[in-house]
Structures are given as C-alpha cells and as structure tokens.
Amino acid sequence: MERRISRTGTGIKGLDDIIGGYPQGRSILVTGDPGSGKTIMGLQFAIQSARSGLKTIYITTEEDETDLRIQCASLGWDITDLLESGKLSIIGLSAMRARLTEAEISIGIESVKGNLRKILAEIPDDTEVLIIDSIGSHTEKLTTDEFRDQFDLLIYELKKRDITAMIILDSATSEEFNDIALYSVYGAIRLIKRENPYTGRRERVMDIIKMRSTRTPIEFIPYIISDSGLEVIENPEE
C-alpha cells in the first residue's frame, strides 16, 4: 500500500477543498478546448507554488514571458517579485524551437519530428514544481509508439526528481495521444465548455478523470473564469 502523499495547493478557489491539492512529486495532465482556461490554471498553480516557497518553473512552448506577464496583469497578478527572487522562472521554448527548425530545414531535413527530451534538458536541477504549457508543439510527426516512449521517459524523470508537474495538452494533441498520456500520469483533469442540458446555458465544468490516492468526485465540477482566474462554484445557475 502506497504511503500517504503530501499535497501541493492548486491555487484555485474551491478546488483544494474537493481534491486536497495535487499529489506532491507526481505529474498531473490537463486537457481542454481552446478558451477553457488551461493556461490560467497553469499560471494559478505556478503562482501558488512560488508564493509557498517552492522553486517553480513555467515552460511555455508557444508564448513568451511577456505574453504571460500581460495575461497575469489582466487578472491582477503581479509576479515581478516572484521572478526577481527566482522563486518563479519562465522558460520560453518557442524561439528555440523556431531556431532549431530553421537550422534543420537549412540542411535538408524536411520531416522534423517532435522531441520531448528537449524539454527535459531545460529543467533546472533545483526545480520543485513544473508547468509545461503545452507539449503539443513537441509531438509533431511522432508515431504512437514514439510518443509513448518519450512521454513515459518524461514522467519517469520528473518522478525520479520528485518534481510536482502539471502537463498541459492542447486539444489536437489530446485527441491523438490522450489515452496513452492518461495511462502514464498520476492524475488527469479535463476542462470542458458545454451547454447545460437543463438550463440551456453555456458553462464550464471540470472532469477529474483520475487522481490516485484521492477521493475524486464522479460528477462534473462547475467553474468560472472570473477577473481573478478560475474559481470553482457551487451554484452555477445563479
């Protein structure tokens, strides 16, 4: 029987009351459609972790630090002190990826495959919490077997280093590799935008697909994206 696992706060109002936080030293998968709040969820976790004194790394594969700081500012989050103290670091891989692709094309390599190992190489040794947003751009042209091998290696290395990680998948990657990724991670949350079957209103809900060592609800968890980020709500119809 597995020992009791310590928890790390999610940074989302109401979610810790439901799942008790994310299991420490394990990897959580977050999937969802565009506009469902995946990046905001990742930023809230990063800020919560850094303010708790944990060395936190936010790897962004599509945006850069300026974009994320603008998004934080729009939600009233000033992360300047966290960045200056080194408790939070933002690593942008989009520019590096563009340079590598240009170099590979220049020498005649037409089919550039994704490589999750490149992400591992960017993680500092003293990292305690990691957010990867997202791995989609590092999975191009990978076969199912190649994705499984590389993703399993990523999860294995993170666990070996006792890093609490949130790995975000975009909707396209999720459709192709979702089942494989779900098998490897310790927990998984899907963010859903849907029409409420009873009220006909559009709403956002979380599906806690799995969270080992945790009592997870079988029902969807309603949430909103407010001026201060994601918030779990009890009465979505009000």
Image (cartoon, grey):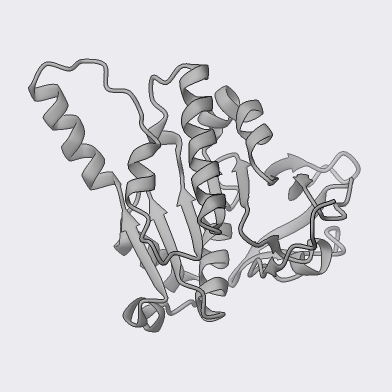
Q: At x 53% / y 26%, what residue is drawn? A: 148
Q: At x 36% / y 63%, what residue is drawn? A: 90
User: What is the x, y in percent for residue 87?
Assistant: 42, 76
Residue 121 falls left or right of residue 73: left
> Which of the 4 image quarters holds residue 185?
top right
Instruction: Name the foreground residue: 186 vs 222.
Output: 186
Asked if one can make out residue 146 in the rendered structure from this viewpoint, the answer is: yes
- Reply above or below: 103 against 165: above
Q: How many marks?
A: 0
Instruction: Name the foreground residue: 57 vs 197.
Output: 57
Asked if one can make out residue 202 in the rendered structure from this viewpoint, the answer is: no
Residue furthest out toward the left: 106
Where is the C terminus found, in terms of image quarters? bottom right
User: What is the x, y in percent for residue 50?
Assistant: 50, 75
> Which of the 4 image quarters holds residue 33?
top right
Residue 43 falls left or right of residue 89: right
- Reply above or below: 65 against 86: above
Q: At x 44% / y 64%, what residue is drawn? A: 127
User: What is the x, y in percent for residue 91?
Assistant: 33, 58
- Reply above or below: 178 against 118: above
Instruction: Name the foreground residue: 141 vs 201.
Output: 141
Residue 204 falls left or right of residue 94: right
User: What is the x, y in percent for residue 171?
Assistant: 55, 34
Q: At x 36% / y 67%, what residue is drawn? A: 89
